[in-house]
Image (cartoon, rainbow, N blue to C red):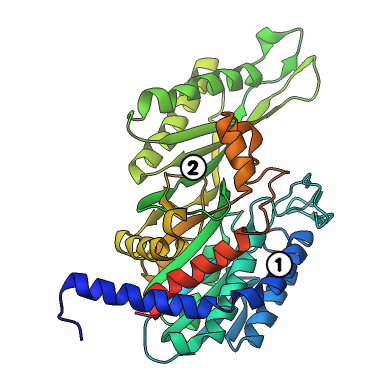
């Protein structure tokens, strides 16, 4: 019996959690073959955001077979499985399902050859270039193992397969689609992402872990003319060039040195012919920040600089600004992260490590924020450890290790799938087995 001291209570919790995890994960060897098959199947058949019908059907069938109450079509193609297992906390586990319009160049025998029609009506190649196929497979495996081992825990498990993470509106779509009415309020929400780290590694971080993101489309209104008569024009090409150069000073001169921000101009579109000065130019920018104050500062600075350059150029019309593809900050709860990190250390040992802030973005946090639940989001490695070590020793990690959204991003099947499945089970049991 506990004497009520915090140290003894922590030790009892750790022992119970580790014992339950070992018992539940004893079934991993049996689930590994079908998980690997599912992974290759999902990788071979990727689906763009809001079009994940096939993937959703696969996971819904598997959840039903494991005894979950299944809700399909949540927020479009989202799938939610609920497994009630007596009194206890509710834990939500989440995976995203969508792929990207990328032409795969991995050379894998199960590489995607899929094409699809995008939102603009264009036929595009489709690839799981961000590892969402890993996420789907790991959550499907964890859901099965926890269902099979339900005698080792108590409470309610919610497994959530989310559409449209890449467009930043899938999580909010599930919330708006009535998610809160379908599930009990979770005590914690948990998620993970495969990253270009050595496979088998698990990384946690308290506080801001993934950046907020904002894309902005800016339309500059000049005055067109013949290329031989520039005096009759307000040249939006020159104007766009001046804006791009000036925007490079926002982070270097307006953001405090200790604060992190990224401002990238990813697209400039203007003109159709060499001897025609066009009447407009369109810039597309992407901003990454880790605090709301810096986010506001950077976006305001962009608008100020663009308006000033337009005035300096003599534009007759104000520029147009459109924000799109906006992602919230992923700001991990301290207590939840500490609990998961302790559980990971107990199971993975030195393969569980703290990690730094990542400049990628996610919409996962929209779900727990809307439900009023704390959350934590961690990272698993997907790169062959020997290949990663060789690149590290040569000082060529940035050049030789494919990153997310690359046409050559291909997590090794193992130990990536085992590690991601184990991490979800261990994190869930840190509450359900307590």
> Which quadrant does the C terminus fall into?
bottom left
Q: Nearer the viewer, residue 228 or 416?
A: 416
Q: Residue at x 42, y 47 (%)?
A: 355
Horizontal placement of 278 versus 197: left or right?
A: right
Q: Residue at x 64, y 61 (%)?
A: 134
Residue 91: image location, x then y, percent: 43, 76
From what the image shows, is residue 311 above or below residue 29? above
Numbered label attached to residue 245: none
Q: Earlier in the sequence, mark 2 or mark 1?
A: 1
Q: Which residue is mark 1?
A: 36
Horizontal placement of 373 versus 68: left or right?
A: left
From what the image shows, is residue 131 above or below residue 178? above
Specify few, some or many for label 2: CA neighbours under 10 Å numbering under 14, 14-19, or 20 or more. some
Q: Nearer the viewer, residue 322 or 203?
A: 203
From what the image shows, is residue 205 above or below residue 359? below
> Which quadrant does the N terminus fall into?
bottom left
Distance from disc 2 to disc 1, alpha carbons, whole Å, reads: 30 Å
Specify few, some or many for label 1: CA neighbours under 10 Å numbering under 14, 14-19, or 20 or more. some
Residue 115: image location, x then y, percent: 83, 54
Residue 420: image location, x then y, percent: 56, 63
Q: Which residue is mark 2?
A: 359
Seen as rendered, the residue at the extreme bottom is 86
Whether residue 163 appears in this view of the structure is no
């Amino acid at each position: 019996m506990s004497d009520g001291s915090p140290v003894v209570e922590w030790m009892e919790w750790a022992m119970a959690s580790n014992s339950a995890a070992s018992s539940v994960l004893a079934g991993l060897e049996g689930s590994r073959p079908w998980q690997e098959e599912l992974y290759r199947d999902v990788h071979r058949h990727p689906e763009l955001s809001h079009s994940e019908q096939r993937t959703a059907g696969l996971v819904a069938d598997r959840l039903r077979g494991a005894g979950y109450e299944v809700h399909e079509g949540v927020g479009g193609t989202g799938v939610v499985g609920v497994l009630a297992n007596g009194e206890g906390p509710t834990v939500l586990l989440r995976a995203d399902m969508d792929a990207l319009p990328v032409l795969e160049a991995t050379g894998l025998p199960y590489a995607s050859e899929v094409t699809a029609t995008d939102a603009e009506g264009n036929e595009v190649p489709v690839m799981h270039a961000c590892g969402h196929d890993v996420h789907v497979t790991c959550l499907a495996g964890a859901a099965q193992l926890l269902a099979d081992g339900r005698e080792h825990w108590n409470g309610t498990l919610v497994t959530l397969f989310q559409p449209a993470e890449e467009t930043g509106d899938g999580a909010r779509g599930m919330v708006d689609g009535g998610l809160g009415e379908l599930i009990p309020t979770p005590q914690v929400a948990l998620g993970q992402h495969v990253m270009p780290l050595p496979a088998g590694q698990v990384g946690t971080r308290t506080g801001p872990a993934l950046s907020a993101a904002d894309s902005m489309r800016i339309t500059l209104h000049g005055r067109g003319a013949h290329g031989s008569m520039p005096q009759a024009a307000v040249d939006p090409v020159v104007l766009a060039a001046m804006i791009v150069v000036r925007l490079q000073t926002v982070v270097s001169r307006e953001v405090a040195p200790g604060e992190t921000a990224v401002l990238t101009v990813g697209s400039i579109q203007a003109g159709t012919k060499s001897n025609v000065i066009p009447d407009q130019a369109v810039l597309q920018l992407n901003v990454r920040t880790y605090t709301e104050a810096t986010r506001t500062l950077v976006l305001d600075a962009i608008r100020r600089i663009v308006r000033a350059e337009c005035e300096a150029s003599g534009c007759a019309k104000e520029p147009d600004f459109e924000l799109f593809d906006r992602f919230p900050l992923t700001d991990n709860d301290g207590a939840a992260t500490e609990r998961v990190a302790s559980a990971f250390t107990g199971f993975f040992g030195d393969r569980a490590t703290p990690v730094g802030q990542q400049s990628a973005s996610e919409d996962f946090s929209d779900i727990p924020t809307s439900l009023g639940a704390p959350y934590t989001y961690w990272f698993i490695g997907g790169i062959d450890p020997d290949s990663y070590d060789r690149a590290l020793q040569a000082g060529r990690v940035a050049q030789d290790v494919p990153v997310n959204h690359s046409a050559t991003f291909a997590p090794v099947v193992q130990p990536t799938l085992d590690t991601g499945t184990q991490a979800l089970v261990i994190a869930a049991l840190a509450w359900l087995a307590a």
